[in-house]
Amino acid sequence: MERHRRNELHQLDVYRCALALYRQVGRLVAQFPRGEADLRSQMRRASRSVPFNIGEGVGKRGRARAASYEVALGEAKELIVALDCVEIDQFAALEDVHIAQDLVDRVCAMLTKLIRSAEAKQRP
């Protein structure tokens, strides 16, 4: 059960979606067959990095904020590739993969807008 949080970070939809993605990736990798420790580890690291970098970006301004969001976006794009591989290799239930794919697509779209917004605030 999640408790209600009132700080700036927890109010961001992109952060809440990134946490949901992290949870979903955890469910997915638990289904992987033996011998897939590298992919499991890589997906866990990337899915954890997304909310970490969003959180870091919230505490910054301007170009530094955009840079943190860009790192989060890069990690999310890495997850898109990993999820495609998981789907092709049938390492997890298709429904679970699709849930993660929808979440990562949503996170990427929101991060792209946040990056543009942060960069626009830097222009004279």
Image (tube, rainbow, N blue to C red):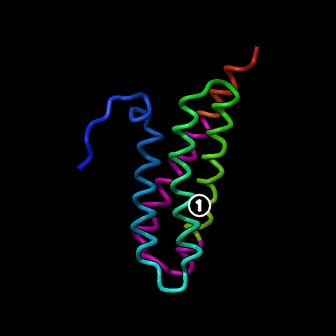
For image coordinates 62% across by 39% down, the residue present is 69
For image coordinates 59% across by 60% down, the residue present is 80
Q: Percent from the top left, x then y, of residue 31?
A: 41, 77
- Which residue is labeled 1 in the image? 80
Overall secondary structure of the magenta section: helix
Left or right: 61 with respect to 10? right
- Residue furthest to the right in view is 124
For image coordinates 49% across by 79% down, the residue present is 91
The residue segment tinted magenta is 85-113
Q: Under tag 1, what secondary structure? A: helix
Quick check: is 79 in the magenta stretch? no
Q: Where, by quadrant of the figure, is residue 45 drawn?
A: bottom right
- For the residue pair 53 and 123, the one nearer the viewer reads as 53
Q: Percent from the top left, x then y, of residue 66?
A: 66, 33
- For the residue pair 41 and 31, the one nearer the viewer reads as 41
For image coordinates 41% across by 74% down, the residue present is 30
Q: Where, by quadrant of the figure, is residue 61 drawn?
A: top right
- Is residue 71 shown above or below 97? above
Q: Residues within 10 Å of mark 1 (few under 14, many from 20)?
A: many
Say what amino acid the circle numbered 1 marks.
Answer: Ile
Q: Percent from the top left, x then y, of residue 44?
A: 51, 63
Q: Percent from the top left, x then y, of residue 73?
A: 62, 47
- Is residue 35 shown above or below 19? below
- Specify the quadrant that holds the C terminus: top right
